[in-house]
Image (tube, helix red, strand yellow):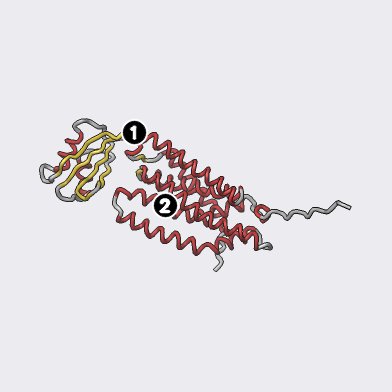
Amino acid sequence: MNIQFMAMRKIVAMFSMALVLISLGSLAIKGLKFGLDFTGGSLIEVQYSVAPQLDDVRTLLADGDYSDVTVQNFGSSTDVVVRMGNAYTPTLGDEVLSTLRNNGDVDVELMRSEYVGGQVGEELREQGGLGMLLALAIVMIYVAVRFQFKFSVASVVALAHDVIITLGIFSLFGFEFDLTVLAAILAVIGYSLNDTIVVCDRIRENFRIMRDTSPSELINESINQTLGRTIITSMTTLFVLLVLFFFGGESIHNFSLALLVGVLIGTYSSIFVAANLLLAQNITREDLVPAPKEELEDDMP
């Protein structure tokens, strides 16, 4: 089976541009919904005598008019950590405890109540952004040295495409962006790069052996040759991420969601975006295979 991927390159390019523009527009207008790791807030840890249903805890806190509440287990099923956007006060822990006791129907004790500073979160946000830019720069240098400059441009633009769309989905749908999501974004860069490098390596090898084939046909053949590997890798990764998403609990819910989106977009970009960009740069065999050196003539008499 030989799927004509490059025959769809114009449609795919418009689709990708639309996704990127929508993502950038959402990021500019709505921004990201930063979690308490970045914005600061209050953290309260309580311990139940019997493991509670976290949904019931969230309902009680929502009825108590607490804002931006995140509830998750901490260490065991009876220990619960509550993060909220409410301003910290010395009595906040007791107020939350009173709400969770539900008029004495629930046996729960307060373990700690403290303020989560936004200054640390701001520094983490800046350092995380710099970390992503540094990762893209290192990728560009590596691919330029390992392959060729046109490949590095295609790879980095494809990675930026994946990151922007993943961030755009979090912005568009209002999913919370915390440190676990930032870690997932960095993991997506690594995953997508690995897939793109496999395709680029096959393209380079085919340029050396398929001498009478146009760049478009050669790239199309290269993608088809690596398609089985790409699908198997993506599917096995997605199976694990789906299990984490549905059964991993709230603490890694957004982490697994970011990876799910990133793996899907990364697989798509490895097949379509990077190869499309190579054609847009007019990649040729001469870019990869140096011309043979002329033999030195013996000028001696």
Residue on which disc 1 sits? 118
Query: Dot 1 lies on which element?
Result: helix
Q: Is residue 175 left or right of residue 191?
A: left
Q: Which of the 4 image quadrants contains residue 9?
A: bottom right
Residue lying farthest to the top in this orientation: 90
Question: Percent from the top left, x then y, of residue 52?
Answer: 18, 49
Residue located 80% across and 53% down the image: 296
- Helix or strand or loop: what does disc 2 sit on? helix
In the rendered view, tell whether residue 72 sits above or below residue 3.
above
- Which residue lies most toward the left here? 104
Q: Residue furthest bottom?
A: 1
User: For the point 73% across and 55% down, which residue is it?
Assistant: 292
Q: In this rendering, is residue 16 above or below 230?
A: above
Q: In this view, does 101 lie to the left or right of 198?
A: left
Q: Mark 2 points at which residue?
A: 261
Q: Position of residue 136 (x, y in %)?
A: 51, 44
- What kind of residue is marked 2? Val
Give me the disc on residue 78.
none
The vertical placement of 31 against 268, above or below, is above
Name the spot of residue 178 as percent of width and height, x first: 36, 42
Count the numbered circles shown: 2
Does 245 sit left or right of 63 as displayed?
right
Q: Which residue is drawn at 69% across and 53% down?
A: 290
Q: Nearer the viewer, mark 1 or mark 2?
A: 1
Looking at the rendering, in which quadrant would you find the N terminus?
Answer: bottom right
Measure how far apart labels 1 and 2 are at the Cα level.
28 Å
The crowd level at tag 2 (other Cα within 10 Å; few <14, some 14-19, many 20+) is many
Of the numbered discs 1 and 2, the one sitting upstream in the chain is 1
| Residue type pointed to by label 1 | Gly
Asked if residue 193 is positioned above or below residue 232 in the image, the reply reads above
